[in-house]
Image: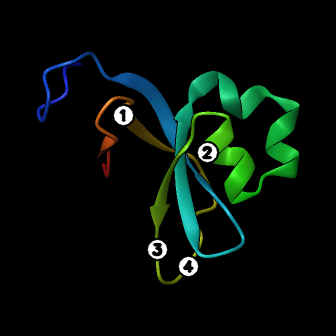
Amino acid sequence: MLCPKCGKKMQSGALGPSQKGWVYWARDDFFHSKILNFMTKRSAVKNGAIIIPVRYGLIDHLTKAWACEDCKYVLVDCN
């Protein structure tokens, strides 16, 4: 999929929950790594995650999403 903002190829991934009121996007392989168990905002960003702030609630399953890692544009499949 191409980024509608900059035209570069987007990476497949998913949204993941945190316990501190933010959601992050990360590549699919990230969710199979052991680092996920020790997630902080700093380690998420260090490992390529894109932070998405939210006000209330956490999700209990992975939401499919694509991201342009260059311009930080994230598309979310809400279906």
Residue position marked by numbered label 1 in the rendering: 67
Q: Is residue 60 above or below residue 57?
A: above
Mark 4 vs 1, N-terminal side: 4
Count the marks: how many? 4
- Neighbor class of circle 4 (other Cα within 10 Å; few <14, some 14-19, many 20+) is few
Q: Secondary structure at mark 3?
A: loop
CA separation, marks 2 and 3? 16 Å
Colour mode of the rendering: rainbow
Q: Residue at x 34, y 41 (%)?
A: 72
Disc 3, disc 1: CB below 8 Å? no
CA separation, marks 4 and 1? 22 Å
Q: Residue at x 56, y 36 (%)?
A: 26
User: What's under tag 4, amino acid-wise?
Assistant: Gly
Residue position marked by numbered label 4 in the rendering: 57
Q: Residue 59 appears at what percent x and percent y?
A: 57, 64
- Neighbor class of circle 1 (other Cα within 10 Å; few <14, some 14-19, many 20+) is many
Q: Residue at x 23, y 19 (%)?
A: 1
Q: Residue 11 appears at what percent x and percent y?
A: 40, 22
User: What's under tag 2, amino acid-wise?
Assistant: Val
> What number is the disc on residue 54?
3
Residue position marked by numbered label 2 in the rendering: 45
